[in-house]
Amino acid sequence: MQQKIRILAVLEQTMADGPGFRTAIYCAGCHHKCPGCHNPQSWDFNAGYWATVDELLEIIKADTISNVTFSGGDPLYQVDAFTELARRIKEETGKNIWCWTGFTLEEVEADPHLAQILPYIDVLVDGPFIMALRDTSLRFRGSSNQRIIYLHGEPPEDIIPGTVPLKPIR
């Protein structure tokens, strides 16, 4: 059966959701409900619409210059479908994938169900937004506890401030 993802929006050729042009997939649903969240409308698991992995992959493939971002909500609350999408993106396009989550990498690694996505994600931006640690000078994160973690390969030469050392996935 075709996997489906509850989607709020798909933004094409955005530059706000990671470096360069990106196709950003904003999913519905988040239990973290971080106070001060910039996207509280994404908390509702019933918001938006259903899209199949094939439908999303068609949009991603059509844009030959953009890499991919998973955001939300929290994609890891729909980890099975996002893992399938990420696997197919890697197999069929080789595009770079960034994923934002309110879980820390350590929490994801400790849960085999959540960890299934890690082999397909290039960069994980982890941790909940914490209003007391809000910092508007940070690139691609809202609070200083959140980390930009390169999971595979070497970080680029123009590394983004706040990036943590390479974390190889076992």
Image (cartoon, grey):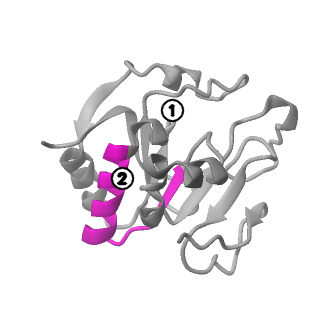
Q: Position of residue 158 (x, y in %)?
A: 70, 76
Magenta-drawn stretch contains 96: yes
Q: Mark on residue 73?
A: 1
* Quarter containing the N terminus: top left
Residue under label 2: 83
> Tag on residue 53?
none
The secondary structure type at the circle numbered 2 is helix
Q: Earlier in the sequence, mark 2 or mark 1?
A: 1
CA neighbours of label 2 inside 10 A, class few (<14), some (14 to 19), many (20+): many
Instruction: State which region is magenta.
Output: 80-99
Q: Is residue 16 visible?
A: no
Q: Amino acid at mark 2?
A: Thr
Query: Residue placed at 55% from the left, 25% from the top?
Result: 31
| Contact? badges 2 and 1 (CB < 8 Å) | no
Residue 36 relative to residue 47: left or right: right
Q: Please name the amino acid that badge 1 sits on.
A: Gly
65 or 78, which lies in front? 78
Q: Residue furthest left?
A: 1
Q: Residue at x 63, y 53 (%)?
A: 105
Tell whether position 53 is magenta: no
- The answer for how far apart the CA atoms under marks 2 and 1 are is 16 Å
Q: Identify which residue is drawn at 25% across, 59% down.
A: 62
Residue 23 locus on image (x, y percent): 41, 52
Nearer the observer, disc 2 or disc 1?
2
Image quarter for residue 165?
bottom right
Asked whether, in this view, residue 91 is left or right of residue 101, the answer is: left
10 Å crowding of disc 1: few (<14), some (14-19), many (20+): many
Q: Is residue 164 left or right of residue 46?
A: right
Label 1: which secondary element: loop
